[in-house]
Image (cartoon, helix red, strand yellow):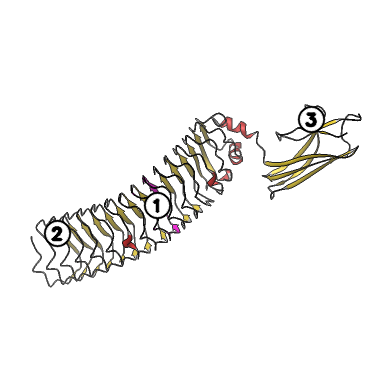
Amino acid sequence: MTNLSGIGNLSNIARFARINFNNALFNLSGLGSLATIGPLLEIQSNSSLSNLSGLNSLTSISGVLRVYNNPALISLSGLDALNTVGGNAEITYNYDLTSLAGLNGVASIGGAFLLENNITLANLAGLGSLVSIGGNFSIVGNTALSSVAGLAALSNVAGTLTISGNNGLVNLTGLGNLSTVNGLNINYNQGLLDFNGLSSLTTVNGSVQILGNDNLVNFTGLGTLATVTGGIDIYANASLTNCTGLSSLNSVGGVLRFYSNISLSSLNGIGPVTSVGGLTLQLNSILTDLSALSTLTSIGGGILNIISNNALSDISGLENINSATISNLFITNQPLLSICEIPNICDYLDNSANPATIYGNAIGCASRAEVETACLLILPIELLDFKAKKISNHISKLSWNTASESNNRGFEVQHSKDGTDWQPLGFVPGHGTPPPLSTMIFTIKTPPLAQTTTACGKWTLMGIPVFPKSFRLS
């Protein structure tokens, strides 16, 4: 079949319209009166079809528009009157398609929009009227695509936004009207340098995956993103050095995972993240600094995984996670990691029923038993000073200041004449978890010193390793 002449009076197709496997068909002349189509318009595998001229009166498709595997198709001109697609729009595997001209009037797509594997498509000009997509929006495998600037009017994507395998794409300029999506996948775009273009995105009601973008250095452009209700998976981005650009991120409902980012040295730029549904830091070979996670207080009953980060020597930065929010703990295969005894990890390990897998780290953190032993040597206070003052022959005053206390019941004061044998003298209540800078005073009315004209008393706050300190009370 070379043309569609003979059906020029057809104005409506209530059911399916399929134009498939017509190798001699060059255009769609003969359909000039067709205004509406029902559940499906499918134009597939017409090897000589170069445009869609002939559909110039078509205004509405109540269901699916599918344009698939038409190897000579250059543009969609001919669909210029179309303003509504009620179902999915699928423009896929048209290898010579260079332009979406013809879709200029389409304002809404009721279902998903698949724009996939059109390998010569360089831009999205032609989608300038598109405001709303009712399902997922997939821009995948368009290897010549260098810009998404044609999407400037798009303000609503009801499903997941996926931008994947578009190796010519360097940024996302053109998506500036999107404030919310229900999932975000940015994967294998080898030319992508940053996220400029997503400057209005505040919420992802779903998960975020950022995977295999080899030239991505940081997250500049995502500065307004505050909430992700699902997880965030940042995986195998070879040039990623830090998290600059995620400065507004506060809450992650699922697991926050950094996996196999070989240039990632710190998480600086992220936050202030306060809650996640689990945390995994794994196979980030030069990661040394976790301090950007110091605002994190809850992992929501999830698992804490710190695995195979070869340069990591301590886990400072995780100390504010409430141990009660950890359901399982893995700290394994970090050859330089020797300091694991931060207070919340100690609290977690103090309950023998709490599961923990700890091995393959440096001495001090090579096993659960080693960490538990190290935990016995730390205190829940920061001591600023400790002073002793003689008031009279029979009265002495001890005073000390703390910079901070964490769940501190109090201080037992002991005395020794020889620094070996200690006797308790009294107890000074602590302040629990007070504001900074607390002062404690203890008065001794009858010091148990030897009755000589000169004596040396040694005083200690029990368990604080910088004492005993000697004071001459003559």
x and y percentages locating residue 302 in the rendered image = 50, 45
Residue 49 disc label: 2
Q: Is residue 208 magenta?
A: yes
- Identify which amino acid the numbered label 1 is placed on: Asp
- The residue located at (43%, 59%) in the rendering is 201
What's drawn in magenta, residue-wise?
Answer: 190-216
Crowd band around label 3 with a 10 angstrom C-alpha radius: few (<14), some (14–19), many (20+): some
Pointer 1 and pointer 2: residues touching (CB < 8 Å)? no
Query: Cα distance, mark 1 to mark 2?
Result: 38 Å
Q: Is residue 106 magenta?
A: no
- The residue located at (23%, 64%) in the rendering is 101
Q: Nearer the viewer, mark 1 or mark 2?
A: 1
x and y percentages locating residue 24 in the rendered image = 9, 58
Q: Of marks 1 and 3, which one's residue comes earlier in the chain?
A: 1
Task: Classify residue 48 by image quadrant.
Answer: bottom left
Q: Secondary structure at mark 3?
A: loop
Residue denoted by label 3: 422
- The residue located at (33%, 49%) in the rendering is 191
